[in-house]
Image (cartoon, grey):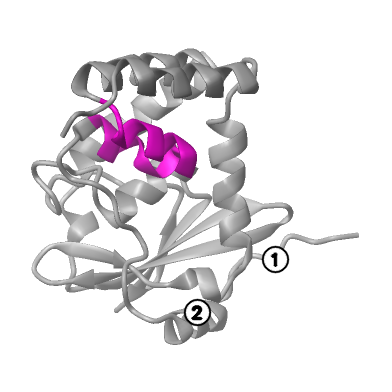
Amino acid sequence: MNMIQKPTAWLLLLLVAAAAGCSVFVSPLRDEWYSQHYFIMRDWEKKIYNGLSADGRLEFQRIFWDARDPESQLAFGDRLEYVSTVYQTENKSQPWNTDRARVYLLNGIPFEILYRGSETQAKSMPRLDTEYEDIQTRQDEVWSYLYRNRFVYYIFRFSPPSQWRLLQTVYTDTFIGQLENSNRDVFFGVVTDEEQYRVDLENLIGKFEKTS
């Protein structure tokens, strides 16, 4: 029988030591809708979107969510509202365009968050209070998600003056990519005719192609 193993202190320290400190996320800044949805979009959707005029992008946005489960759109809206409030201290103009926000938008509430600092603590999700951002007692945050009877981890380290940067944990746990693909392709996946959905988006290129 497969047993779910909770993270131990020595494992978390090993993951932090093994990870190289740099963010693996890059998303566009100018288009607000695109920067919010970038990490739940597939590569071919991004390519089409970037080739459209302003009117074409509005039509793309409508088709994008019409093809998906309304519950997933509601969930995304709730997550976006949350990160827009909680992560303003890191990015006032685009709080969703931060490492912790992007992980939260794609994966939702972590199973557990551990703080590595003067004292290790755990809770079910981030809190909106001043203590949460106290860098004097919190050097690292380790977010765990349950995936296929095991835990996968995201490790964030504080980077002055106000950023929390994701360490490259993708190389210490190959299941991270599988977790993200599952959330992108299943939770935020197309529930209508996917072939027709793709045709509808590709048809926008001829109608609303970007001219400059």
Q: Is residue 145 above or below residue 19?
A: above
Q: Residue 193: image x %, image y %?
A: 65, 16
Q: Residue 22: image x %, image y %?
A: 31, 74
Q: Which residues are magenta?
A: 33-52
Kind of residue at disc 2: Leu
Question: Does 71 appear in magenta?
Answer: no
Which callout, 1 or 2, points to the residue nearer the camera? 2
Q: Of the residues under marks 1 and 2, which one precedes in the sequence?
A: 1
Residue in the foreground of this view, choosing between 101 and 132: 101
Q: Residue 12: image x %, image y %?
A: 50, 77
Number of numbered tags placed on the structure image: 2
Residue at point 50%, 79% (across, down): 15
Quadrant of the image occupied by residue 49: top left
Q: Is residue 143 above or below residue 39?
A: below
| Main secondary structure along the magenta-highlighted residues | helix
Q: Is residue 69 above or below residue 34?
A: above
- Looking at the rendered image, the quarter that the N terminus falls into is bottom right
Quadrant of the image occupied by residue 57: top left
Residue at point 51%, 68% (across, down): 170
Circle 2 SS class: helix
Disc marking residue 5: 1
Q: Residues within 10 Å of mark 2 (few under 14, many from 20)?
A: many
- As measured in the structure, the alpha-carbon distance from the residue carrying label 1 to the one carrying label 2 is 15 Å
Disc marking residue 15: 2
Quadrant of the image occupied by residue 162: bottom left
